[in-house]
Amino acid sequence: MRRSSTLVDVFLLLALFSGAPWAVKGSPHCSKRANTGEIRPHSVTITEFGAVGDGVTLNTKAFQNAIFYLNSFTDKGGAKLFVPAGRWLTGSFHLISHLTLWLDKDAEILGSTNSDDWPVVEPLPSYGRGRELIGGRHQSLIYGRNLTDVIITGDNGTIDGQGSIWWNWFHNKTLNYTRPHLVELMNSTGIVISNLTFLNSPFWTIHPVYCSHVTVQNVTIIAPPKSPNTDGIDPDSSDNVCIEDCYISTGDDLIAIKSGWDEYGISYGRPSRNIIIRRIAGKTETSAGIAIGSEMSGGVSEVHAENLHFFNSKTGIRIKTSPGRGGYVKNIFVSNVTLDGIDIAIRFTSHYGEHPDEFYDPNALPIIEQITFKDFVGKNIKTAGLLEGLEGDTFLDICLSNITLNVTSKSPWKCSSIQGYSDLVSPETCEPLKERISPEHYLDCYYLSDHIWISSNQNKGVQFLSW
Ligand SMILES: *[C@@H]1O[C@H](CO)[C@@H](O)[C@H](O)[C@H]1NC(C)=O
Ligand SMILES: *[C@@H]1O[C@H](CO)[C@@H](O)[C@H](O)[C@H]1NC(C)=O
Ligand SMILES: *[C@@H]1O[C@H](CO)[C@@H](O)[C@H](O)[C@H]1NC(C)=O
Ligand SMILES: *[C@@H]1O[C@H](CO)[C@@H](O)[C@H](O)[C@H]1NC(C)=O
Ligand SMILES: *[C@@H]1O[C@H](CO)[C@@H](O)[C@H](O)[C@H]1NC(C)=O
Ligand SMILES: *[C@@H]1O[C@H](CO)[C@@H](O)[C@H](O)[C@H]1NC(C)=O
Ligand SMILES: *[C@@H]1O[C@H](CO)[C@@H](O)[C@H](O)[C@H]1NC(C)=O
Ligand SMILES: *[C@@H]1O[C@H](CO)[C@@H](O)[C@H](O)[C@H]1NC(C)=O
Ligand SMILES: *[C@@H]1O[C@H](CO)[C@@H](O)[C@H](O)[C@H]1NC(C)=O
Ligand SMILES: *[C@@H]1O[C@H](CO)[C@@H](O)[C@H](O)[C@H]1NC(C)=O
């Protein structure tokens, strides 16, 4: 065992076997509030502000005016903006605190296809520049900053970014700034995004950055298989995030946990931690079901993912990093994963590349440790594991337990610069992981199996269970 035992470890070990009250197991839902629809004392409908749902009229002003009006209710319990059935074309608009944006059945918010309707904003400090181009970036269609208690929900209404024009601008290299997200919340707390469908984001679909207490529940996210960079949900330098009961099919990673880019992410220093992901199904022909990185310079830890089903995809679970990233990925526990039709079930990529500029420090090596994969079954898998650590920076305490994959490759595991343990793995695992998981490895391997430290949040409107 590599970790030296500390008082905390002893306490954890006791808790593990005694069922301490703060270690309640397997709670089924992120948020205990039963109905996010009934909590606001005031409500207005977007048509009261002149919106026209014909799919042609630009309604940016109507959304802005409605939200400006609702600002006077933020200290009176908040308000709901109701979007009825119709096709509501709009440019980017800002949310406010204590707001519910509610999309009724057959309501569709459509992103404008004119890039001028998506103003350019500052780059994120943890990225130092736009992710794809130097300089600023287009603001997301639905944007929030410095907010508390925001709910984006409805009766399976749709938010459609109409991203194909952005994908064309990307392919023909006529973008001037980094493409926008469909929804971005920055430096905010108490966020619920639920019961909706998100289509055709120009870039990453849902992007909470520098946020706390974020729930994404029961959403469908779709973009075409080859649409560029259309990640599903990207918690970025955010903590206490719960993502559950979602179907995601996009052109890039379905869920990607991030925390900033190279020297900018290192100096901003805000990790992503306490992240629960469960009951997610989906496919991605190009990328991974769950990815961590490649931007992970602020660190990623305490991630518990379970009950996942990925099919017809390139990769199941992937950790991506590079020299220059710095940071860490540790205490990751992924269990009960069903895979079908996957090229690489588990992948570590240690030379992902892609740097913001030439000023990154090539000696800033990431620390990757205590990563457990348990109870995986897979069929139609090409390669079980392609696990590349970094020379001189071995990835430590990688644990594989009860993994059964029906693979076609004759060398199903390829491993380098990693160290760890395994149990009940078929096909037989690679040499560096052959040592059995014995009781003295339990803390390294099962640290997070029953323990998730999502704290409670007392914001009015949204309450979270503490696990
Ligand atoms: C989703 O919709 C269902 C059915 O209307 C409702 O019971 C549930 O509270 C909603 N969940 C959230 C988080 O909005
Ligand atoms: C958010 O807070 C920052 C720091 O106080 C401030 O500079 C910025 O203008 C605020 N933005 C909004 C949209 O409130
Ligand atoms: C974040 O939001 C809080 C509260 O709205 C504000 O005080 C703070 O300055 C903001 N920080 C940044 C970096 O935007
Ligand atoms: C999921 O959302 C749909 C509407 O989008 C709703 O009918 C259903 O009840 C929700 N399910 C849960 C578990 O909240
Ligand atoms: C919501 O709508 C999407 C797209 O139309 C559909 O695929 C999904 O099954 C619907 N979800 C529910 C819970 O009705
Ligand atoms: C690039 O794509 C856009 C959007 O489809 C199109 O309007 C534009 O004419 C194209 N430009 C070039 C140089 O191909
Ligand atoms: C990029 O800038 C040029 C020159 O201002 C403009 O004509 C073009 O429409 C812009 N492209 C996009 C995708 O906004
Ligand atoms: C494993 O996950 C699947 C969904 O992919 C779920 O149906 C099943 O109940 C889970 N099994 C356990 C033991 O939780
Ligand atoms: C191994 O994992 C499978 C699939 O999740 C599960 O059904 C089975 O009970 C597990 N076996 C053991 C010994 O834990
Ligand atoms: C594994 O694959 C082989 C060859 O394709 C097939 O015969 C066998 O039934 C598969 N086993 C399972 C458990 O899917």
Image (cartoon, rainbow, N blue to C red):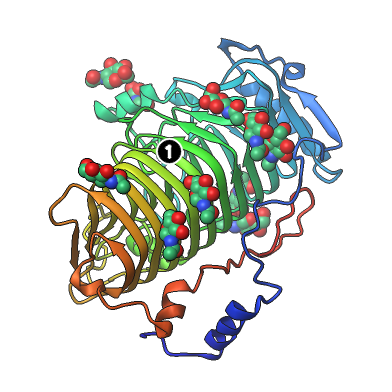
Categorize mark 1 by other alpha carbons within 10 Å: few (<14), some (14-19), many (20+).
many
| Residue 159 appears in the figure | no
Which percent across, then down, holds residue 403? 34, 59
Q: Splitting the image into four quadrants, where does ligand 5 fall?
A: top right
Residue at point 63%, 38% (across, down) = 194
Say left or right for 358 vs 117.
left
Say left or right for 102 vs 214.
right
Which percent across, then down, holds residue 215? 62, 48
Residue type of the residue flagged with mark 1: Gly
Residue at point 25%, 68% (across, down) = 361
Which part of the image, by quadrant, shows the N terminus?
bottom left
As drawn, 233 above or below 423: above
Residue at point 55%, 83% (across, down) = 13
Classify residue 363 by image quadrant: bottom left
Question: Which residue is outermost to the left?
Answer: 410
Say left or right for 349 vs 59.
left
